[in-house]
């Protein structure tokens, strides 16, 4: 099945039961789902397999960041699990990302391999705390160029940086953007945000949306409302 929707719903839950209940409210032809650290640590590969059995394409958002061999082997395991997309931290560097690419190239199936640039919860002051005297845009552009030349398929960034990534890495390079906040929702811990409409206008490939859907009174309606706003 080819899904044209750019929406990836973040299933950030402590256990399988609420995650699978939320998945049952969603339509696999209208969105993909994302399994992150909380859910995967609690439930392991079974949760990914169960979501795939329900017809969902799964983004395994474990943001691997380790020595090249360890990162590559983890990405290989994700490929064998059959996930649609997997990610690593671009700040793990060129050798780590190239090792991940090479490991995927040896597999019979290759998920999309994406590099996390600057977390959408961070702004310039957070970068300064790390000794990085640059704007988020500059750091994202730098890491996106590194990810592209290391063989990755795209990056996680905020929708604010999609233009600069397209300028630096071309229009085929995927942009996966959390920090999406419909006008009716709170920013919570996200700092670099955009509405879904703005994100689509900016040209994002995929937008990751968690709490605005999963914590809505009616999650299916919230997802449908966001999709309708993009039409
Ligand atoms: O830079 C990043 C990378 C990953 N995320 C993840 O996306 C979702 C966002 O959830 P919301 O509830 O819509 O804030 C969450 O799973 C994060 O781990 C991110 O937000 N920013």
Image (spheres, helix red, strand yellow):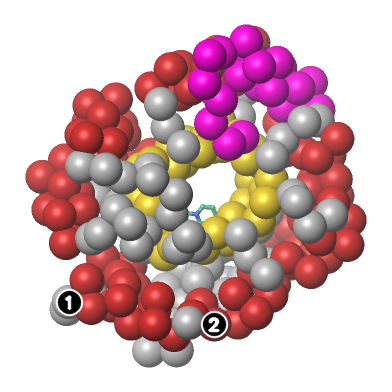
Q: Compared with residue 146, is residue 8 higher up or lower down, i.e. above or below?
A: below
Say left or right for 40 vs 144.
left
Disc 1 crowd, CA 10 A, few/some/many (<14, 14-19, 20+): few
CB contact under 8 Å: marks 2 and 1 = no
Measuring 31% from the left and 45% from the top, which residue is drawn there?
Answer: 56
Measuring 25% from the left and 59% from the top, which residue is drawn there?
Answer: 27
Q: Compared with residue 230, is residue 164 higher up or lower down, i.e. above or below?
A: above
What's the magenta region?
Answer: 93-113
- State yes or no: residue 110 in magenta: yes
- Residue 129 position within the rendered picture, expressed as x and y whole percent measured from the top left: 72, 56
**What is the CA distance from the residue labelled 2 to the residue labelled 1?**
20 Å
Can you tell which mark lies on residue 197?
Answer: 2
Disc 2 crowd, CA 10 A, few/some/many (<14, 14-19, 20+): some
Name the one closer to the observer, 146 or 92.
146
Can you tell which mark lies on residue 218?
Answer: 1
- SS category of the residue bearing label 2: helix
- Residue 183 position within the rendered picture, expressed as x and y whole percent measured from the top left: 45, 89
Measuring 56% from the left and 25% from the top, which residue is drawn there?
Answer: 110
The N terminus, quarter of image: top left
Say left or right for 37 vs 73.
left
Name the one closer to the observer, 11 or 3.
3
Specify the quadrant of the image occupied by residue 209.
Answer: bottom left
- Residue 82 position within the rendered picture, expressed as x and y whole percent measured from the top left: 41, 26
């Amino acid at each position: 099945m080819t899904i044209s929707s750019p929406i990836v719903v973040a299933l950030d839950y402590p256990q399988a039961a609420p995650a699978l209940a939320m998945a049952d409210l969603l339509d696999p032809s209208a969105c993909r789902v994302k399994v992150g650290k909380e859910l995967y640590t609690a439930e392991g590969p079974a949760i990914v397999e169960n979501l795939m059995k329900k017809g969902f394409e799964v983004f395994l958002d474990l943001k691997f960041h380790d020595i090249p061999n360890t990162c590559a082997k983890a990405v290989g395991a994700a490929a064998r699990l059959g996930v649609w997309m997997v990610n690593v931290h671009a700040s793990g560097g060129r050798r780590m990302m190239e090792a991940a690419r090479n490991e995927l190239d040896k597999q019979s199936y290759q998920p999309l391999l994406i590099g996390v640039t600057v977390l959408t919860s961070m702004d310039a002051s957070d970068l300064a705390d790390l000794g990085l005297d640059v704007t988020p845009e500059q750091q994202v552009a730098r890491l996106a160029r590194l990810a592209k030349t290391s063989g990755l398929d795209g990056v996680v960034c905020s929708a604010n940086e999609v233009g600069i990534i397209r300028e630096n890495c071309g229009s085929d390079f995927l942009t996966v953007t959390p920090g999406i906040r419909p006008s009716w929702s709170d920013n919570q811990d996200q700092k670099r945000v955009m509405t879904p409409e703005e994100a689509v206008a900016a040209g994002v490939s995929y937008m990751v949306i968690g709490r605005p859907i999963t914590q809505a009174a009616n999650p299916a309606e919230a997802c449908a409302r966001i999709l309708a706003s993009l039409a």
